[in-house]
Image: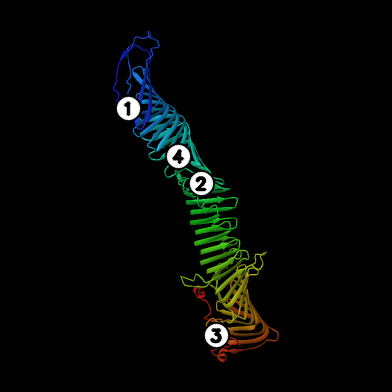
Amino acid sequence: MDISDQRPRQSQVKLNHITLFYYFSTYRKQTCFYLTLFVAVLLPALSEAQVTVAPLQQDSTQKLKIETALVVEYFIKGERTLQKLSGNVRMRQENTLVYCDTAILDQDNATLKGGVVIEQADSVKVFADSALYNTDTKISHLFGNVVLVNGVQELFTNRLRYDLGNKIATYHTGATLTNGQSQLTSTHGYYYVNEKEIFFKGDVLGTDPDFTMRTDTMAFNTETQTVRFLAPTLISQQKSRIYTEGGFYDIENDFAEFDLNPQYEKEGQRGKSRKMRYFGTTKEYMLEGDAYIDDPEKGRQTQADVIRYNTDTEKTTLKGNAHFQDSTRDIRGAEIHVDSRNKAYQITGRGRVIDPPNIIEADSLDFNDVLGAGLALGSVVWIDTASDFTILAHRMDYNKKTEFLNAFGGMGLNGASGRPLMKSLIERDTLFMSADTLTSYKPDSASDTRLLLAHRDVRIFKSDLQAACDSLSFSSADSIFWFYKIRDIPVIWSDTSQFSGDTIRMLLKNKKLDRIWLLQNALVINSEDGLLFNQIKGRTTTAFFRDDEVREMLVEGNAQAVYYALDDQRAYIGLNETQCSEMRLYFGNNQVESIKFYNQPTGSFGPMKKAGTDTKKLEGFFWEQVRRPRRLADLF
């Protein structure tokens, strides 16, 4: 029969102490009750007080229901009756089961000792050596070897306060939370079981086979396996460390996001940004907002709006205001991809690379240090600071090791399709040159000499100098341009003068035009009105310049001259025709001031009436105006 079926019985006896033993057992869902009552009057004459014997049955209003116990003892303490349960004790309060070796029940308070287990609906179990449990507040204080188990999470401590009604566990003497191979320890903790949240406070330490984590305050969600950082936190891995003051870490997916002053360090490399993400499965870091990586040991600095770095592949992607600098080059662009292991980089979007003595800009750039080869596409700008010239093109192939580049296509002018263009500052004025192909290289890697080659339909424009030829070469060693004939004869124009020859050399000295050599079939023509033409012809001709004007001219080999004389009012007065083996002409204000003839000169002078209105033309005469570039647009 059930103890709750008994009715209270009272009797008055003289006694000092009453002991009752209850033996319970269960068989075939029937509870048998055996009662042996021993009343022992230990000191029969010591007290005459009246004592009311406690009821033998369990009170129906009692909140903690007794289900099993081997022994039940009643004690009288003042006006209260205490129950002591011993041996396989099991009690229940609603959906909470309490197990222990010994329990002392004092109204709403229960003192539990030995093998204490508190279980809530098979979801939470708490183990302890002893506990104090209040049935009214449903708050339990557990002591000794305390273990709270919730699914795969196990919390170990030596003192725990557990609010069973609200399912909140609190400790302040240190605890360890385990989850398989991971552990978290702290001095203080607050475990909200229903919310599946644990807050750790004070000397928080997390350990895992892959990392160690230290902080002062953090939260952990037992369901999502997510850690939230609420204070300065240091995460240490085998070769790297991460610091943050806020963020979260998804343990199960090995993903972290740090959003308050995040920083990391790996083998001397340091990085920081406004937000940082870590992808453990791919071993990647993503830095967002004012992202910065410094690697002083390798001489590298990296900056961008977003930086993505893979520690396994050593590949870095920079997006937005990207800047990468190492010991040899400085790279800027909208997006940069750097392969540090293979020493290669790629720029998408407008980019700029400073690789002394060269600077290159393009819409797209690829370069491989191992091969030394690069490709630039789209509005390419190449600046050679050593030779002081710039090449503009649509495409450029170049090799760092051999200092070789080939330029094709061009940006054109005002959006027009064009050809590669070279420009260089000469005497505070810019010289422009275009051709179908521009090539530059170093013939000797040991020197700084650079050669520039232009092939097919070469055109040069300067405000006071223009030229056209089939092909051209320029050496920075002597600053001499060579103009070559393949189909059309090379021509140079300066003001009202035209210089031509099968081959032409043009010397720049101190960035100024110094002289021009006309080799084979040399012809110089000058005309102020385009009607009558002064002509000087010879096998070779050398023109000497000062302040961009011809000051002297030496004609050698079968020298011939046709010259129209002027009076003081610059009116034509006659025609001079002279032949000799060599002549030297002196100029002033772009006019012939005097001529010296050598080796038996012959000649004649005739008045204009005799000369006529048609110009006298030497053999091979031509006045080229179609090929002459008169403005920059004519180069394309």
- 574 or 323, nearer to the observer: 323
Q: Residue furthest top?
A: 45
- Display coloring: rainbow
* Residue found 57% across the figure and 90% down from its top: 611
Q: Answer left or right for 629 relative to 148.
A: right
Residue type for callout 4: Gln
Q: Which residue is mark 2?
A: 263
Q: Nearer the viewer, mark 4 or mark 3?
A: 4
Near mark 3 (Cα within 10 A), the count class, few <14, some 14-19 or many ≥20, is: some
User: Which residue appears at 35% of the width and 29% of the height?
Assistant: 31
Of label 4 and label 3, which has the lower sequence position? Answer: 4
Give the farthest residue toward the right.
599
Q: Of label 1 and label 3, which has the lower sequence position?
A: 1
Instruction: Find residue 178 and report its horizontal and vertical position in percent.
Output: 48, 39
Q: What residue sits right under mark 3 in the picture?
A: 532
Q: Amino acid at mark 3?
A: Leu
The residue tagged with tag 4: helix, strand or loop? strand
What's the amino acid at mark 1?
A: Asp
| Label 1 sits on residue | 2
Say which element carries label 3. loop
Question: What is the distance, in whole Å, between disc 1 and disc 2 at their CAs?
Answer: 68 Å
Q: Kindly report which numbered mark, 1 or 3, lies closer to the viewer in this rendering.
A: 1
Residue type pointed to by label 2: Gln
Q: Which mark is residue 153?
A: 4
Percent position of residue 570, x then y: 54, 82
In the structure shown, which secondary structural element does the residue marked by tag 2 occupy?
A: strand
Mark earlier in primary sequence (4, 1): 1
